[in-house]
Amino acid sequence: MYNNFQKYLQDELQSIKDAGLYKNERVITSPQQAQIKVGDGDDVLNFCANNYLGLANNPELIAAAKEALDTHGYGMSSVRFICGTGDLHKKLEESIANFFGTEDTILYASCFDANGGVFEPLLDENDAIISDALNHASIIDGVRLCKAVRYRYANANMEELEECLKKAQSQRHRLIVTDGVFSMDGNVAPLDKIHALAEKYDAMVMVDESHSAGVVGHTGRGTTELYNLRGEIEILTGTLGKSFGGAVGGFTTGKKEIIAMLRQRSRPYLFSNSIPPMIAAAGIKMFEMMSATNKLQDKLHANTDYFVAAMKGAGFDIKPTQSAICAVMLYDAPLSQKFAARLQEEGIYVTGFYYPVVPKGQARIRVQVSAGHEKEHLDKCVAAFTKIGKELGVLK
Ligand SMILES: *Cc1c(COP(=O)(O)O)cnc(C)c1O
């Protein structure tokens, strides 16, 4: 009975390939870190992981995870409200709230789940969600699961946001939702302006800190630190899968009644397994390290400034960034693919992005800087970009 469906899938897959949009996965055979092994090739320098603080292979986190395997076992085999809540889960939730200066936190298996489970329990057809057009797919899906009236504004466009807020005055409650850092350009949401508009038009705010936590703000506390709004934003979501060790796990943190309601009604929380104790233990350790010293965030900021200045100095067209994401604009899709392939031959591992991931004519290579990079790594990257840039006629 599979024949017709098989044929249908084969045709669809072929058309994805014909359009040049088929995603092939390169296989990494070393731990995730600055220098990695891809397949059987030579080592390459990794500039496309979300490993912003270089913690993905950190010995202290590994030791904390190993210890928790001995003290707390391997898995929980339960959702939180039946018998899946451990002391480590509670402690990690507290660590996250302390880090962000919020009242309470709820853990999920991923930030995709956190975003998928945040809207529907809180808002209904009487309410409004006002969403940035470039928000992450998980926010878009979460909004789809909720009956609230939907409004959308162009990326970081405050005039459009204000128009939406005016229209949404007839709804009961209003929630503005935005990514903290937008992953393709590296720009930060103008949270000061968003917060001011929310005050003016009686709205709440939710920020997804996935790409900003650990990165943005003097001590890496995210957009609320950058804009001096700690404790002021009703809902923050984030991931343990990027800056915070890169393993797995997500969270929603914010006002305590909101978190309490999510524990009662959020479906990805109620109907999905708890994160393993070793992940919670490593997470606790990670937040301990962050409160003891700011050296990784300082190094990341210094690395990013150094890299962006060197790339601009070399003549590249770099999107203005306030994060560890550096978009090297090439504007041409095939060129972006060729450029990335040549860079890999030169030992620099990056990914070229083009339509539909970014707008048509906006093809680019996205470089992600990490505290795990040393100056010599950054210099090698700039030198390789410069060499290939000349070779492919991007630089004069
Ligand atoms: C990566 C990311 C997510 C998903 O996080 P996971 O924990 O990997 O599911 C959600 N939102 C944003 C903005 C992200 O960048």
Image: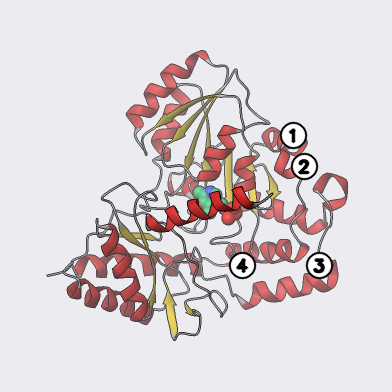
Which tag, 3 or 2, sits closer to the chain's start? 3
Sooner in the amino-acid sequence: mark 2 or mark 4: 2
Query: CA–CA distance between discs 2 and 4?
Result: 31 Å
**Residue tagged by mark 4?**
289
Up the image or down, 352 lies above or below 206; here it is: below
Q: Give the CA separation, mark 4 to mark 1.
A: 33 Å
- Label 4: few (<14), some (14–19) or many (≥20) C-alpha neighbours in 10 Å: some
Q: Which residue is mark 2?
A: 270
Amino acid type, callout 4:
Met
Residue 292 image position (x, y, % from top left)? 60, 66
Tag 4 or tag 3, which sits nearer the N-term? 3
The answer to whether mark 4 and mark 1 are in CB contact below 8 A is no
Front-most of 356 and 209? 356
Residue 300: image x %, image y %?
A: 43, 67
According to the picture, the residue beneath numbered tag 1 turns out to be 265
* Marks 2 & 1, CB-CB < 8 Å contact: yes
Q: Amino acid at mark 2?
A: Leu
How far apart marks 3 and 2 lie (CA) works out to: 21 Å
The amino acid marked with disc number 1 is Arg
